[in-house]
Image: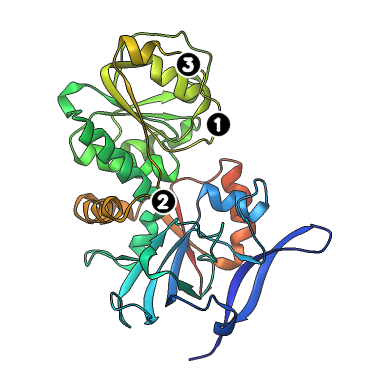
Amino acid sequence: MSDMFNAVVAEKDAEGVFSVGIKALSTSDLPVDGVLVDIDYSTLNYKDGLAITNASPICQKFPMVCGIDLAGTVIESDSEQWVAGDKVLVNGYGLSERHWGAYSQKQRVNAKFLVRIPSQLSTEQAMAIGTAGYTAMLCVNAVRDHGTAPEDGPVLVTGSAGGVGSIAIMLLAKLGYSVTASTGRPETASYLKTLGALDIIARDELARKSKPLEKEIWAAVVDSVGSTTLGTALAQTKYNGVIAACGLAAGLDMPTTVLPFILRNVRLQGCDSVMAPMNLRERAWDDLASLLDTSLLSEVYRIEPMSNIESLASAILRGEIKGRVVIDVNA
């Protein structure tokens, strides 16, 4: 087994000029402590796009190996919990921010960050799901834990053609909910209906200045967009409804008032995938393995080589990526 491997490394020079590219590393370059993983696949997420392009200061130290998701096989372990041959994944935990990340053929990772890949899933399928699908599951579980049932009314999924939205639709439809998908790309309508959406609405119906309260429509919302879309969704959520908020693709702001909360008892539930406790992670991955139709999952993603990561990062920030992109770190 060669000691050398490739990784996508972000750097800043003495003048603070940012650069990113594929570099050859050795295992001696990796963090000293942790579990050594032979990585098969990573993924492309919006956050990865921000990091690779430096559009937002995701990387908090340099040099930094980018990539927030990985799936592979344990080679060496400093933990009794993991042994060589274990199939593992990591989502978040500051990879690509404070800790070296997943766009690498090998990585040494804190043992506490690892999740065992359910036996029903391959490493490729685990990354087809990735942080986006795991986040979608956290959101869907927030809806279920709130007590919202399919008979309570339709569930709105915003940013529906993206990674979180696509898998949220699949999960909600499998659980019997009536799903309405919001998208700014009308050409994705047939794709969204294949995933299980019953209705499609244009993004512009939500991405606008709303009244403090509007007609009650949604029993629940899974929102990865934020900004005016989230504000309008809040104004349209039914009494005792819930919004699972997990993203900010449209912006950090949330134009709303207290009225949905104090007059309609609406709950706004944040869903953090980066530092979620292990019991929520393991529950989410067990649920994903049992609920997702893997034949339908194959319609949601494509595989791209790590050598294309810079162009892919720009494309996801421009809103040009449909569904999921799995990154083959060995290509």
> Which residue has dot 1 on it?
250
> Which residue has dot 3 on it?
256
Q: Of the residues tagged 2 and 3, which is closer to the observer?
A: 2
Residue placed most toward the observer, 237 or 110? 110
Local SS, label 1: loop
* Label 1 environment density (alpha carbons within 10 Å; few <14, some 14–19, many ≥20): some
Looking at the image, tell me whether mark 3 or mark 1 is earlier in sequence order.
1
Q: Of the residues tagged 2 and 1, which is closer to the observer?
A: 2
* Residue 275 tag number: 2
- As measured in the structure, the alpha-carbon distance from the residue carrying label 2 to the one carrying label 1 is 22 Å
Q: Position of residue 182 (x, y in %)?
A: 42, 28
Look at the image and tell me whether residue 130 can be seen: yes
**Whether residue 209 is situated above or below residue 143 in the rendered picture:** above
The amino acid marked with disc number 3 is: Thr
Left or right: residue 251 compared with residue 155? right
- As measured in the structure, the alpha-carbon distance from the residue carrying label 2 to the one carrying label 3 is 27 Å
- In the image, farthest residue toward the right: 15
